[in-house]
């Protein structure tokens, strides 16, 4: 037997997998790559336009130099948040792929060095967790370079800085996963949960302090003093030991044409990145197999299961309501509350709804993200009164509309990221649902009800807080509530329906299902629907209110436009519930498993 | 070729395998039986180096799996009950990957790949992506990959599940041939008829303890039953299952 170059072996494996995946995905239809490229270009272009406009505004209107401290802080924040996101995302992805995938069990039973398996998985995790930065970060940095009139080599330095930088958080995430599995295998979820909670709390506190301190002063004090005070809250991002600061500094030096200094920071980023990666790879050679063993055997032989929830002996299982009601008596109160809150929904649909809710609430990775986003929004809404106290009504009107847009986007993310993959996640177990003695449309109705109820609770609550804080009139509150309800229904219908039309039973990772072709199409359809609903239902009222004191006011009857918009919006909402669900039900009826 | 020396494996406070001793020579087809949860899969995972014994030692070809794991794994092939295939590789690419992983020279690898394709009749689908394979096709590809590097130890967990009678017959012939050629075959199965037909020696494990080990004749004597392996197995494991005999 010859000596095996395992690095080359895994490199060839990855190339083969990529080539075959590419052919399988794009080989049969030219429509799919076209849609993916177009969607990516639209998102990229949108972010670029916003960033370009923002940087131009800062430079031309406010007189902020592109290589100065204020833009530096923005870049520091961008790279710091990227680093935090990458630490957690690469850590979680690596944990999943190193310790709970069938592939690693296969590889570990072969004569392969543990650090080689780690390196192979590390590259995959890093590529997967940093693609979003390529889509959203590159347009910002390119806009920065263009507005700052950066020399040509800025665009050469940019990917070099990026590649060196992602090594640091990626390696840190990987090291964290190895340490957690090796030293607290039974409490790993609690440790990660605590870390995330601490980070979220720190972030919320920081935002709270900024919001509390900045707004009133901004309008009354000298601008310079207010900005100086505001900047003091960002000093932690500028620590000379923070790699995010090295990247920010380095890129600004490139824009200034200081190549020597830029090369110094580039070397600093790369040397630290490679060193940390090396340390992590060495740790993997010691700890990976040990951790795999500890994770597999650290707990009990069997996991403790919840007590059985069958109906008591002698109790009839038909009609199902009786058995369900009695079994739920022993269930957690949230499940019982959900079941009891929807008496108008068919019992078997309610049962499926409770099952979906139970799966959802037992997976913190799912609801954690919604909780963080909703929490941030709530914090912003509850502090918004400080901004508007000194603002004119037109700003109040505009801000309330923008808040509604943000809530709509949150709903679109919720349905696209969590609701769309729900049917696919039934996966190879789908036959269980398929064989249940209930009409298959009930499966979709259950998922639709779950999505709609969840979306309504979150979005209506946020909309109400936003409007009350902005002291909006009663008619605006009602209008927003109705708009949010139509959005929740339509987006749920789209996601559930399209999820059934284009299921992916092979994939078990919801983020990958959401990022696939069907998920992307659903996201685009959702965004389009969102624009149409906001444009037809909410925008006319806000536009009319804005124009009330102007000359054009009264040219068009207010009630007529708003009423027409309402009818269009309601019709659109109904169509987005009925048509996708009908298509989904048809697909589900014809589905073989 | 395979030696387990006083191997104990604990999961937290529970003992999955208790003081297990096995010594299996080259060319033996050794069957490993036991009820569900008896510790069979844990033992197999320790023999592949996926898990480490809490105490004791596992040796493959004289190499300690804990200290010289890569050398030991170079000698063996493991076919789990739910085998893994890369969905986006063709059968041929998968066989090539395995041959490369075990360091077969290019010419020898090509020769061996052609041989296993012939042996397992993979011609018709070997150049398709494995995601399109049926259960039988997957199983044949996995066995082909397990044998492509001519292992000295073949560990097989529940190989007959989901196979049609023709495939089961072919598999039984293959396992016997491998043992006759000098490969140590370690077979874990609930198919007692297969084991009865093939095994040179049989070990029965329950609650992590070795209940009996020997050829069928010796097991019949141990159980005081003159019947099939099923009767012997049920008698031995029934006795062991009685509360008074359970390990505390």
Image (spheres, grey):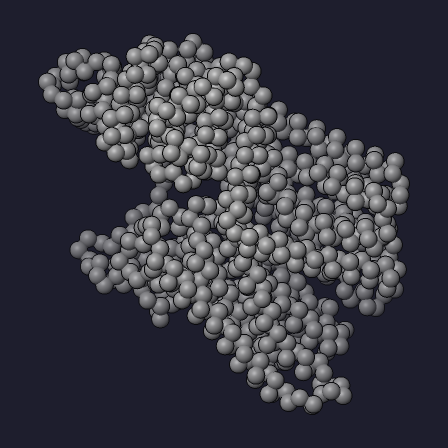
Instruction: Kindly identify the residue that appears in the image at 54 percent across and 22 percent down.
Output: A113
Q: Is residue A96 visible?
A: yes
Res. A115 in view: no
Observer-nearest residue: A183 or B25?
B25
In the rendered image, which quarter is residue A394 located in? bottom right
Residue A549: x %, y % from top left: 74, 86
The total number of labels drawn is 0
Q: Position of residue A434 (x, y in %)?
A: 32, 54
Residue at the image position 55 percent from the left and 38 percent from the top: A19
Residue B51 occupies quadrant: top left
Residue B11 appears in which quarter of the rendering?
A: top left
Q: Would residue A562 appear left or right of A338 to someone viewing this image?
A: right
Percent of width and height locating residue A242 = 75, 40
> What percent of the width, then of the height, locates residue A424?
43, 52
Q: Is residue A325 above or below residue B33?
A: below
Please tell me which residue is depicted at 39% across the width and 23% down the height of the picture.
Answer: B116
Q: Is residue B118 left or right of residue B67?
A: left
Q: Closer to the camera, A480 or B90?
A: B90
Location of residue B70 with respect to A265 vertically, above or below: above
Q: Residue at x 54, y 31 (%)?
A: A13
- A40 left or right of A318? right
């Amino acid at each position: 037997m010859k000596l095996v170059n395992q690095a080359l072996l895994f490199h060839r494996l990855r190339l083969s997998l990529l080539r075959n995946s590419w052919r399988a995905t794009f080989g049969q239809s030219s429509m799919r790559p076209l849609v993916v490229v177009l969607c990516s270009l639209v998102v990229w272009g949108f972010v670029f336009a916003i960033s370009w406009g923002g940087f131009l505004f800062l430079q031309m209107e406010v007189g902020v130099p592109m290589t100065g401290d204020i833009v530096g802080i923005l870049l520091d924040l961008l790279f710091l948040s990227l680093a935090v996101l990458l630490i957690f995302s690469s850590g979680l992805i690596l944990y999943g792929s190193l310790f709970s995938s069938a592939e690693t069990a296969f590889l570990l039973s072969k004569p392969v060095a543990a650090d080689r398996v780690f390196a192979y998985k590390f590259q995959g995790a890093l590529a997967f967790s940093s693609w979003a930065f390529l889509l959203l970060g590159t347009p910002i940095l390119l806009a920065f370079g263009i507005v700052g009139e950066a020399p040509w080599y800025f665009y050469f330095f940019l990917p070099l800085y990026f590649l060196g930088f992602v090594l640091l958080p990626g390696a840190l995430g990987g090291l964290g996963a190895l340490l957690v599995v090796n030293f607290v295998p039974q409490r790993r979820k609690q440790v990660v949960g605590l870390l995330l909670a601490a980070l979220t709390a720190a972030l919320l506190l920081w935002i709270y302090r900024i919001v509390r301190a900045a707004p009133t002063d901004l309008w009354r004090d000298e601008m310079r003093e207010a900005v100086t005070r505001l900047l003091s809250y960002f000093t932690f991002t500028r620590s000379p030991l923070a790699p995010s600061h090295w990247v920010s500094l380095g890129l600004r030096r490139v824009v200034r044409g200081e190549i020597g200094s830029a090369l110094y920071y580039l070397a600093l980023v790369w040397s630290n990145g490679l060193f940390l990666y090396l340390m992590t790879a060495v740790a993997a050679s010691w700890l990976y197999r040990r951790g795999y063993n500890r994770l597999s055997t650290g707990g009990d032989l069997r996991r403790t299961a919840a007590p059985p929830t069958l109906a008591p002996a002698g109790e009839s299982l038909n009609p199902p309501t009786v058995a369900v009601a009695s079994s739920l008596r022993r269930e957690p109160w949230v499940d019982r509350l959900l079941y009891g809150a929807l008496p108008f929904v068919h019992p078997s649909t309610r049962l499926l709804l409770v099952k979906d809710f139970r799966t959802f609430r037992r997976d913190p990775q799912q609801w954690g993200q919604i909780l963080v986003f909703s929490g941030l929004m709530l914090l912003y809404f509850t502090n918004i009164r400080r901004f508007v106290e000194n603002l004119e009504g037109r700003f109040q009107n505009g801000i309330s509309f923008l808040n509604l847009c943000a809530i709509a986007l949150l709903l679109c993310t919720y349905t696209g990221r969590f609701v769309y993959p729900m049917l696919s996640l039934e996966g190879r177990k789908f036959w269980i649902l398929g064989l249940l003695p209930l009409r298959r449309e009930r499966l979709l109705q259950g998922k639709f009800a779950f999505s709609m109820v969840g979306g309504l609770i979150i979005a209506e609550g946020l909309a109400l807080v936003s409007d009350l804080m902005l002291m909006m009139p009663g008619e605006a509150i009602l209008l927003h509530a109705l708009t949010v309800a139509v959005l929740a229904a339509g987006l749920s219908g789209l996601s559930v329906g399209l999820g059934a039309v284009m299921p992916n039973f092979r994939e078990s990772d919801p983020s990958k299902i959401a990022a696939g072709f069907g998920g992307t199409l659903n996201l685009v359809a959702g965004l389009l629907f969102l624009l149409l609903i906001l444009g037809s239902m909410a925008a006319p009222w806000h536009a009319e209110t804005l124009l009330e004191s102007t000359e054009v006011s009264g040219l068009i009857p207010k009630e007529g436009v708003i009423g027409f918009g309402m009818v269009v919006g309601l019709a659109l909402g109904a169509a987005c519930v009925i048509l996708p669900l009908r298509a989904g039900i048809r697909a589900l009826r014809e589905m073989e498993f | 070729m395979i030696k387990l020396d006083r191997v104990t494996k604990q999961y937290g406070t529970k003992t999955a395998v208790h003081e297990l001793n096995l010594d299996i020579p080259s060319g033996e087809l050794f069957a490993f039986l036991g009820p569900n949860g008896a510790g069979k899969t844990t033992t197999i995972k320790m023999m592949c180096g996926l898990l480490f014994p809490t105490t004791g030692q596992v040796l493959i070809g004289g190499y300690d799996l804990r200290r010289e794991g890569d050398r030991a794994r170079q000698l063996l092939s493991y076919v789990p009950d739910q085998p893994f295939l890369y969905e986006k590789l063709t059968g041929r690419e998968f066989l090539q990957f395995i041959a490369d992983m075990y360091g077969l020279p290019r010419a020898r690898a090509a020769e061996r790949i052609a041989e296993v394709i012939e042996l397992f009749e993979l011609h018709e689908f070997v150049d398709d992506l494995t995601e399109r394979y049926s259960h039988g096709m997957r199983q044949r590809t996995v066995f082909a990959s397990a044998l492509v590097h001519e292992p000295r130890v073949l560990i097989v967990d529940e190989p007959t599940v989901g196979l049609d009678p023709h495939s089961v017959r072919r598999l039984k012939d293959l396992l016997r041939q491998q043992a006759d050629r000098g490969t140590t075959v370690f077979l874990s199965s609930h198919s007692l008829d297969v084991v009865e037909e093939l095994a040179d020696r049989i070990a029965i494990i329950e609650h992590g303890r070795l209940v009996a080990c020997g050829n069928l004749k010796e097991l019949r004597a141990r159980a005081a039953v003159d019947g099939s392996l099923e009767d012997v197995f049920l008698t031995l494991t029934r006795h062991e299952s009685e509360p008074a005999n359970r390990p505390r």
